[in-house]
Amino acid sequence: MIVETSAGKVRGSFEGAVAAFRGIPFATAQRFAAPHALAPWSGIRDSVEIGPAAPQLASRLERVMGGFTVAQAEDCLSLNVWAPAGSGHPVLVFLHGGGFTSGSGGLAWYDGAELAEHGDIVVVTVNYRLGALGYLYLPGVSEGNLGLLDQLAALRWVRDNIAAFGGDPARITVAGQSGGALSILAMLAGTDGTGLFRRAILQSAPAGMPPTSPEDAVAAGRMLLRELDLAPDEQRRLFDIPVADLLSAQYAVAARGGGAVPPYQLVADGDRVGADLVRSDFAAGVEVLLGTTKDEAAAMFTDAADTVTDQLFRGSTLRLAQTLAEQGNAAWLYRFDWHPAASPFGACHCLDLPFLLGSAAAWAHAPMLMGERPEELVEYMRERWTGFIRDGDPGWPRATEHHINIHAAPPKDPT
């Protein structure tokens, strides 16, 4: 299948009932610079393999999700599209999580073929810059929030190109999990995302983690310099430091800080990201589906997991839902409770993902699943999520302060 995009033609491959296009570049960027449009290419570009992931070290969630090995490169701004036959389909754009330091939209975990076929929707996954390369804030070097700018560039690409893949640019839903969800929260609070999507899904957003203040972000940038044995007046050398050295220094800064908050994340620059992500005009006109897993922090901590879950995820999500309801926004709240009976992680962070994206084979070795992935729950979750994507209705009452518990069998009373 050949599709013409704004930068040139791409060739995908058929995978069952959907056409798959992998590794389509949507923008390009120099180190520590904002993304910009691609130069058009001539001929037809093969898009059958995923693009490289953003440079990163092993994820701290490897203990629950398992590990992965993919090619990495600074030139990593690409996306993947799975499209059923026909035109006018609703569109889902998924932003992966990973604490702003790990992950890739090209991982088999996030493959969109099954969801696209099941829901008769177009599915898009995105790569964006991570860690210090994506979120360093150091005047004279990086303006910060570059990963967020990458995500916005991807959404603009989808708006401008998705009709060629059979998608409806007027029916775009953006979804994100963890750091991806927090990024969407920033978009909903600002103006840069206006008009780029009709609906939003926030899965396990760490809404209790505010953006870093500019002062603290600069301090984290100076810590990176010290780890690299650079004086403040040598900060321009960051443009030439090998990627491996940057990652090693980034890891050292994170290890020194400890805790749940990454040193390089969203920065309250007062322009795209405010200090308070929930403003008076927050999410105006956007329908929102949001929720958490029951035991979020068990994926990251053995002690005080319940407290961290409440502070970082559950409590802030409930408050966010209440704010949406008070403002008259259409919002639906859920909680994901299912987990393997013998799992030491419970219904931990990321446990909902295998029931939406990827395949049984992709998730076969995830420790948090312990070999279980009930097909009835896969069907149930996908039905509810695609109902929201298609019609703005996941099938239960709009939220105020209540939530829905999602189990292996659909609840008799979803209220």
Image (tube, helix red, strand yellow):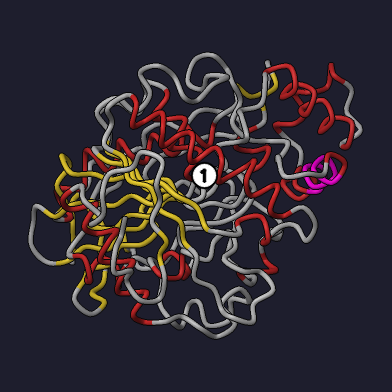
Residue 157 x %, y % = 29, 40
Residue 305 placement: quadrant = bottom right
408 and 30: which one is in front? Answer: 408
Up/down of 272 relative to 397, above or below: above
Number of other residues with Cα within 10 Å of mark 1, as a class: few under 14, some 14 to 19, many 20 or more: many
Q: Say which residue label 1 marks.
A: 205
Amino acid marked by disc 1: Ala
144 and 207: which one is in front? Answer: 207
User: Looking at the magenta stretch, what is its main secondary structure?
Assistant: helix
Q: Which residue lies furthest to the bottom in this view?
A: 371
Residue 33 placement: quadrant = top right
Q: Which quarter of the image is occupied by the C terminus?
A: bottom left
Judge from the rendering whether residue 180 lies leftward or rightward of residue 249; answer left or right: left
Q: Quick check: can you spot residue 364?
A: yes
Residue 51 x %, y % = 46, 58
209 and 222: which one is in front? Answer: 209
Q: How many marks?
A: 1
Residue 138 placement: quadrant = top right
Q: Does the magenta stretch include residue 25?
A: no
Up/down of 305 relative to 371, above or below: above
Task: Identify which residue is drawn at 57% across, 19% down.
Answer: 275
Residue range highlighted in magenta: 248-255
Residue 67 x %, y % = 64, 70
Up/down of 383 relative to 288, above or below: below
Judge from the rendering whether residue 186 lies leftward or rightward of residue 47; answer left or right: right
Task: Identify which residue is drawn at 20% across, 60% down.
Answer: 121
Which type of secondary structure does the marked residue at label 1 adopt? loop
Residue 114 x %, y % = 30, 73
Task: Identify which residue is drawn at 52% across, 44% down.
Answer: 205
Judge from the rendering whether residue 253 lies leftward or rightward of residue 75; answer left or right: right
Q: Quick check: can you spot residue 78?
A: no
